[in-house]
Amino acid sequence: MGINRNNNFRNLTINDKANYWPYGGTFFSSPTGRFSDGLLVPDFLAMKLKIPLWKPYLASGGEHEFLHGAKFAGGGSAALGDLGIPGRKVATVLKQSLGDMEAKKLLMEAVYAFSIGTNDYASFAKTYPFANATKQQEYVHMVIGKLTDVIKEIYKIGGRKFAMHNVGPWGCMPRLRQYFGLSNNKCHDGLLTIARMHNDALSNAAMEIESQLAGFKYLIFDVYNSALIRIERFKESIIAYRGNNCGIEPYELCSNPNDHIFFHGAHPTEHCYKQMARLIWEGGPNVTKPYNMKQLFALEVKDIEN
């Protein structure tokens, strides 16, 4: 959850970057490329692991030692787009620096985290606002199929532990409420329905992959219900930033973003990300199962040949 700074190094429009004020103001006192006022979920997880905050993969021109991992995410990414995960290059670099056996061990013990799906369904909803249940199910099948293919590709390279979250209650997202002309405390039922379709399909797909791939371990964090509970509590005070586009005048920014769930129309505040990171790291089976992140990192995986 949460987008890092790789977009800073891509040839994209300013709307796809977060390297301008007021992004980053809470923690960094300046914009860093994170689509929030401060730290994101991966940042908090790095702190739990007592390692440096992960740098964006593209910051070093793709040259990276990977010993503490790396971040490949970018704002606007989608499962049905080009995920562009340079998995085989990572494996090659590790083998060159550590040797085959140590690299294989590191790849097996690492956790591969995915935050994907919402942009796919946002695009689908805008393109097919009146799609029936059959059309929705077909689209969900496409998204889950692409994610499954990527997981299996990483498994072939040596990955065994995978962390995912389901799609959140994006029908309650301020930007989409505005787009569909909904009042501040009303969510779009149709968008929530397709999110639940995805979440059921993701759970089923993970269990199916587990039955197919020896040594495959995973967690799914229930961001849907975790976020929905918080949104319902906040209601009218859901958003810290008010304006058509972040950073473009005129806009209004509250004095304390920690009082809100969303920093702006599409991304949460640092305070919300911190809560989500805590749940992912040590939450019970009501929010993350069959493991939490702490348990997933601690799991021993067998050396199984593909």
Image (cartoon, rainbow, N blue to C red):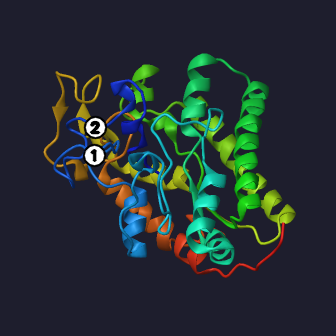
Query: Quadrant location of the C terminus?
Result: bottom right
Does residue 207 sit above or below 298 in this rendering? above
The residue pinned by badge 2 equals 19
Please tell me which residue is depicted at 82% across the width and 58% down the height of the picture. 208
The residue pinned by badge 1 equals 32
The x, y position of residue 11, in whole percent, is 42, 27
Q: Is residue 58 left or right of residue 152?
A: left
**Residues tagged 2 and 1 counted as in contact (Cβ below 8 A):** yes
The x, y position of residue 204, in whole percent, is 77, 54
- Res. 306 visible in picture: yes
Please, which residue is most extreme toward the left here? Answer: 255
Amino acid type at mark 1: Thr
Q: CA distance from mark 2 to mark 1?
A: 5 Å
- Res. 163 visible in picture: no
Element at label 2: loop
Please tell me which residue is depicted at 53% across the width and 45% down the height of the picture. 168
The x, y position of residue 182, in whole percent, is 42, 24
Query: Residue 205, which numbered label?
Result: none
Q: Is residue 146 left or right of residue 72?
A: right
